[in-house]
Amino acid sequence: MSKQRKLLFTVTIIYTLFIIYFMFFAFGRGDSEADSYTFIFVPDNFLKLPNPLELLHPTLMDIVSLGNTAAFIPYGILIPLLYPMKFVRFIILFMLSILLLETVQALTLLGSFDIGDVLKNSSGAVIGFVAYSIGIRAKTVRRSVFSIGISIVLLLIMNWGIGDGIDKAIAKNPGSFVALNELKNSSGVTSKNTTLLPFKIGGQEITPQFNVYDTNGKKSETYSYKLNGKEFYFHLQYGIPDQNDFEGSISVSVDGRQILSYSSKYQKHKPEIFEWYFEQADVLTITLEGNEKAWDVGYREMKHFWE
């Protein structure tokens, strides 16, 4: 083995040990108290890198996200230098290695198996391999290094743009506002016929736009809606009108889990806004007591652009 080859081999081994350290022990992984294996087979984003403006004041997660791609670029250069091979063979061997490391990371409870990390690591290796393939054609070492450097920068920008475009294409976004009273009320009570008259809370005039919920003159009233596993952002406003005695309460629960509970003891003499994100919800229940009112109750369902 030539001196140059020995040097490249040594650099590759040292760099690999450095990467393994960060994958298994950095960021407090050794102090983790995880007691279950975590396997993530569906990435929450595709090759997502921090926004360039975010890197002006980067957070730890911004650095980790960028590092998941950039840290593996050297492999696309070092491996072909040590063992010349075609791209298909290189990327298959690289991905198998990363899949193995991710699996060990999860089984040792020193991290999680995240297919998103595999994609980002592999995209970095691809950038390195392509940049090396371009730079190796240069006639001098200096030009070769320059070509590889420029290629890496341009390919990173391309990766950034492609990943962001794919993310925007496949990501879910909030749809238009749907008033809750447009859904079938499983309790048989509806606010569709409720007149949307203005009222005051804390001297502020409130004019409901979509609906109003109250106790209908009873001590309490419950409204229940079937949501069929929707993913959405929930919104409501609530309060006790000035013209009534300041007594009442509101509670909201989803699938039996209470997410809002406020009585007049803790409320202020002003309208309150409540918002909540549901990854999945089947039954939403709103219970009002006394003089409590809720209005403009509804949601924005998370949807892909093609739905």
Image (cartoon, helix red, strand yellow):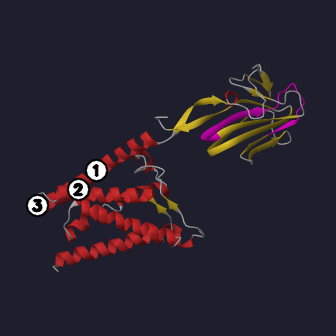
Q: Which residue is mark 2?
A: 131
- Measured Cα–Cα span from mark 1 to mark 3: 22 Å
Q: Position of residue 181 (x, y in %)?
A: 70, 28
Give the SS element for disc 1.
helix
In this view, the mark in front (1 or 3)? 1
304 left or right of 151? right
Whether pointer 1 and pointer 3 mark residues with C-beta atoms closer than 8 Å, the reply is: no
Q: Position of residue 225 (x, y in %)?
A: 71, 36
Whether pointer 1 and pointer 2 mark residues with C-beta atoms closer than 8 Å, the reply is: yes
Q: Which residue is mark 1?
A: 155
- Measured Cα–Cα span from mark 2 to mark 3: 16 Å
- Measured Cα–Cα span from mark 1 to mark 2: 8 Å
Position of the N terminus by quadrant = bottom left
Seen at 83% across and 33% down, the residue is: 292
Residue type at the position of mark 3: Thr
Earlier along the polypeptide chain: callout 2 or callout 3?
Answer: 2
Give the SS element for disc 2.
helix
Residue 219 against residue 104 in the figure, above or below: above
Q: Is residue 74 visible?
A: no
Q: Position of residue 133 (x, y in %)?
A: 19, 58
Mark 3: few/some/many CA within 10 Å (<14, 14-19, 20+):
few
Seen at 88% across and 35% down, the residue is: 247
Q: Is residue 276 visible?
A: yes
Name the disc covering residue 140, or none: 3
Magenta range is: 228-250
Q: Nearer the viewer, residue 85 or 58?
A: 85
